[in-house]
Image: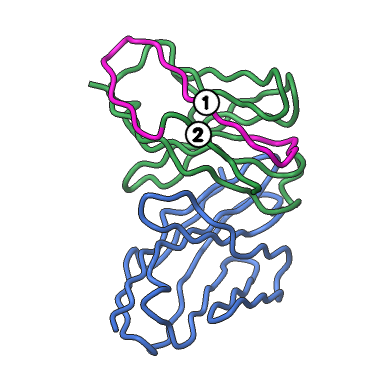
Chain colours: A green, B blue
């Protein structure tokens, strides 16, 4: 089944404790992206990757890191999480980099709480 | 700066009562207008892409239309299972900018 998977689905952590949220897709998509969703602010793009070893900042990259060493994986790293990073996070992928290309597939989401 | 505004924020309909959701946008170099459906606790699910003014697309009870400044998602004779949050997004460059969404509730 074609899908985007994220782990963990739920995470409660404390300020400053480094964490990684994994994202994997099995559709051989070139483009992958991370979003956060907050009440009243909608979905905002954090980082995206056009292909392996190619990453770029979205609208809200502060406090996050990403890497794209393999085509299928795009982990989101929070080196020193803070309470304002408490949010619902989504990973997404699409076949290629052009925005006008095909639909974007979203993962099931990771709900992160930073105390 | 690209901006997307959706209205209303919430909409309650009776089953069978048709209505429309609005998505107004300002973007430099539109490369696509996207509609998604999001159910509680799940990721957004793709519905439509519209590329140029005048374009229309349909899927079951949903019909999306596009002008140079806004898009409408028309829902004809909705059913309770159409209850969800509907998200609009515009594509420019390599990114998507989303609106805040419209939460639709359809009562039987």
The furthest residue to the front? A1
Q: Which residue is mark 1?
A: A22
Residue at the location (68% across, 65% down)? B50
Marked residue nearer the N-terminal end (2 or 1):
2
Q: Chain of mark 2?
A: A
In space, the residues marked 2 and 1 are separated at their CA atoms by: 6 Å
Q: Chain of mark 1?
A: A
Q: Are marks 2 and 1 in contact (CB under 8 Å)?
A: yes
Residue closer to the observer: A80 or B31:
A80
The furthest residue to the left? A115
Percent position (x, y) of residue B59?
A: 61, 76
The tag on residue A6 is 2
On whether residue A18 falls in the magenta region, the answer is yes
Q: Residues within 10 Å of mark 2 (few under 14, many from 20)?
A: many
On whether residue A59 falls in the magenta region, the answer is no
Residue B83 is left or right of residue A21, and the answer is left
Screen quadrant of the C terminus of chain B: bottom left
Q: Residues within 10 Å of mark 1 (few under 14, many from 20)?
A: some
Residue closer to the observer: A115 or B7:
A115
Q: Quadrant of residue A82?
A: top left
> Magenta residues?
A9-32
Percent position (x, y) of residue B79?
A: 40, 81
Residue at the location (59% across, 65% down)? B69
Percent position (x, y) of residue B72?
A: 54, 73
Q: Quadrant of residue A80?
A: top left
């Amino acid at each position: 089944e074609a899908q985007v998977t994220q782990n963990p689905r739920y995470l409660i952590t404390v300020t400053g404790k480094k964490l990684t949220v994994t994202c994997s897709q099995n559709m051989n998509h070139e483009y992958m992206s991370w979003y956060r969703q907050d009440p009243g602010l909608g979905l905002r793009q954090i980082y995206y990757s056009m292909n392996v070893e190619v990453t770029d900042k979205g609208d809200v990259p502060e406090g996050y890191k990403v890497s794209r060493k393999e085509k299928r994986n795009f982990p989101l790293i929070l080196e020193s999480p803070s309470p304002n990073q408490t949010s619902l996070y989504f990973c997404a992928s699409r076949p290629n980099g052009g925005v006008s290309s095909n639909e974007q597939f979203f993962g099931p989401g990771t709900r992160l709480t930073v105390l | 700066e690209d901006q997307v505004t959706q209205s209303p924020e919430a909409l309650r309909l009776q089953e069978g009562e048709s209505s429309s959701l609005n998505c107004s946008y300002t973007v430099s170099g539109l490369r696509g207008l996207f509609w998604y459906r999001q159910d509680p606790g799940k990721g957004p699910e793709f519905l439509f892409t519209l590329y140029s003014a005048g374009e229309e697309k349909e899927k079951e009870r949903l019909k999306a239309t596009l002008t140079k400044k806004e898009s409408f998602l028309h829902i004809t004779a909705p059913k309770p299972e159409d209850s969800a949050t509907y998200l609009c997004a515009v594509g420019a460059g390599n990114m998507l900018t989303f609106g805040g969404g419209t939460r639709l509730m359809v009562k039987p």
